[in-house]
Image (cartoon, grey):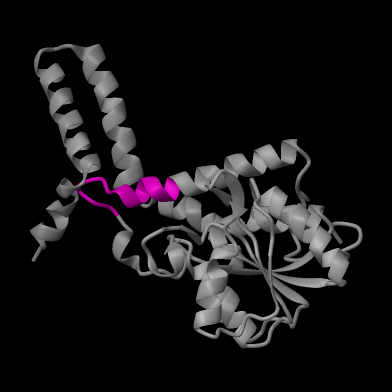
Amino acid sequence: MMNWIRVLEPLSEPLALFWVLLCLSMLWFLRRKRWSCALIQGVFVGLVYGIGSTPLATVLLGTLEGPYARAGLGDLPVGDAVVMLGGAHRPSRYDVFGVDLTAAADRIVTAVEMMRLRKAGALVLGGGGYEANGQKLADGPLLEKWFTTWRLPVTPLFTLEANADTHDEAVHFATLAKAHGWKRILLVTSAFHMKRAAATFRKAGVAVVPVACDFRVVGVSDESRGYFLLPRREGFEQLELYLHERVGWWFYAWRDWLVTDTSQPAATNPGGGAA
């Protein structure tokens, strides 16, 4: 028996309501034989349905995540350092430890777990920055109080300065790695972001072993997949992530910020870019 509550649940979201209004508007134009207006409305109806009610966005995002799926962390080689890219947290004055975890918080869990498994001798936190008292501060140190209070196995711990993007993180980390003589790096970031991140670090001369996490579609429950009567926001969120990475790849390639040959999962020559 069809669960109509689940079927109609998206009507509580603005997207589904907007789509229903588009459908009604299209029918209104059709009834008055205003064919051109009805066609325009129909195009938008089809686009919203295709993105929000079909597996299209899931399949596209899966092409980015699939190559980095692994059964666990046990088979990872031991590296000199773990570097966790930013985006997993942000400052929040009234939350515990002054930190608000984002949808990418799996990056933190993965990085700490690798340190617990002694997969590397140091943890490096990347990330962007925020304004406080007229100063630009890096958001990596926001996690230090949490880690220290819970006595998590993350020492020695390093934090990068505030970064504008993944390219900045790669360049700043390369300088730190050179100073400490680190050769093999375990790179932690979201699976959909890993291809661009790994290529950017290789371009900066850092040999990385990709350790993907924060999988949004690959290996995740199939409950949100398939076809739906009403469009859902998940499809648009997945498409946004996919397009962000595709456009980001083209932009980084244009700026010569990445190694475009990603047939190998890791570089092996930290002194000279890609192997």
Q: Is residue 211 above or below residue 132?
A: below
The residue at 85%/71% (across/down) is: 180
Image quarter (top left, top right, bottom left or bottom right) of the C terminus: bottom right
Toward the viewer: 50 or 181? 181
Toward the viewer: 141 or 197? 141
Q: Quadrant of residue 223?
A: bottom left
Asked whether residue 54 is in view, the answer is: no
Q: Is residue 115 above or below residue 165?
A: below
Image quarter (top left, top right, bottom left or bottom right) of the N terminus: bottom left
- Residue 117 vs residue 10: left or right? right
- Residue 144 vs residue 41: left or right? right
Q: Is residue 30 above or below residue 20?
A: above
Q: Quadrant of residue 144?
A: bottom right
The residue at 17%/11% (across/down) is: 34
**Residues in magenta, as a range:** 227-239
Q: Position of residue 96 (x, y in %)?
A: 40, 69
The residue at 48%/65% (across/down) is: 215
- Residue 111 vs residue 160: left or right? left
- Tally of numbered tags: 0
Q: Magenta stretch: residue 202 in it?
A: no
Q: Position of residue 153 (x, y in %)?
A: 60, 85
- Residue 11 vs residue 87: left or right? left
Q: Position of residue 225 (x, y in %)?
A: 33, 59
Pick out the residue farthest to the right. Answer: 271
Q: Position of residue 75 (x, y in %)?
A: 66, 85
Q: Quadrant of residue 17?
A: top left
Q: Magenta stretch: residue 236 in it?
A: yes
Toward the viewer: 180 or 96? 96
